[in-house]
């Protein structure tokens, strides 16, 4: 059976020393996360701006990619998994690149 004892002064000092290390460590991690999110938001805004600057149909390209991702599903609309847990492509899968090339070519021809 464990005995309960009153915490001593040395116990509180040890706890205080650990917190002096943990607090800056956690604040640094938080700072890294905040700067990472800010960078991703800035980069995303820059990329979208460049797509619009050159008149590229970003939303249509993203729609093609999403349709291609959905074509990876099985006939029942559910993911297909291999024995090792890897996600397999369904029978109706198609790569998005050819449709994206056609879309961009049609946009260049119209310009």
Image (cartoon, grey):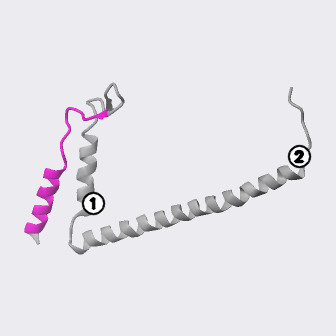
Place of residue 74 in the rendered image (x, y in percent of width and height, measured from the top left): 27, 31
> Based on the displayed image, in which of its 4 quarters is residue 48 positioned?
bottom left
Quarter holding the C terminus is bottom left
Quadrant hosting residue 80: top left
Where is residue 39 shown, x and y percent of the image? 43, 67
Bounds of the magenta span?
87-109
Residue furthest bottom as drawn? 53
Badge 2: residue crowd in 10 Å (few <14, some 14–19, many ≥20) = few
Front disc: 1 or 2:
2
Residue 7's disc is: 2
In the figure, 75 relative to 36: above or below? above
In the picture, measured across the screen, residue 55 lies left or right of residue 22, that is left
User: Which residue is at the far left?
Assistant: 109
Q: Look at 11% across and 56% down and name the residue there.
A: 102
**In this view of the protein, which residue sits in the foreground, 9 or 52?**
9
In this picture, is 95 found above or below 20?
above
Residue at 17% from the left image edge and 51% from the top image edge? 97
């Amino acid at each position: 059976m464990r005995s309960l004892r009153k915490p001593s002064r040395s116990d509180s000092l040890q706890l205080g020393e650990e917190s002096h290390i943990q607090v800056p460590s956690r604040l640094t991690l938080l700072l890294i996360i905040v700067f990472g999110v800010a960078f991703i938001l800035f980069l995303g805004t820059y990329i979208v701006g460049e797509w619009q600057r050159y008149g590229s149909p970003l939303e249509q390209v993203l729609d093609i990619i999403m349709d291609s991702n959905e074509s990876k599903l099985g006939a029942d609309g559910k993911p297909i998994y291999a024995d090792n847990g890897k996600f397999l492509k369904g029978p109706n899968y198609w790569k998005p690149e050819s449709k994206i090339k056609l879309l961009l070519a049609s946009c260049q021809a119209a310009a």
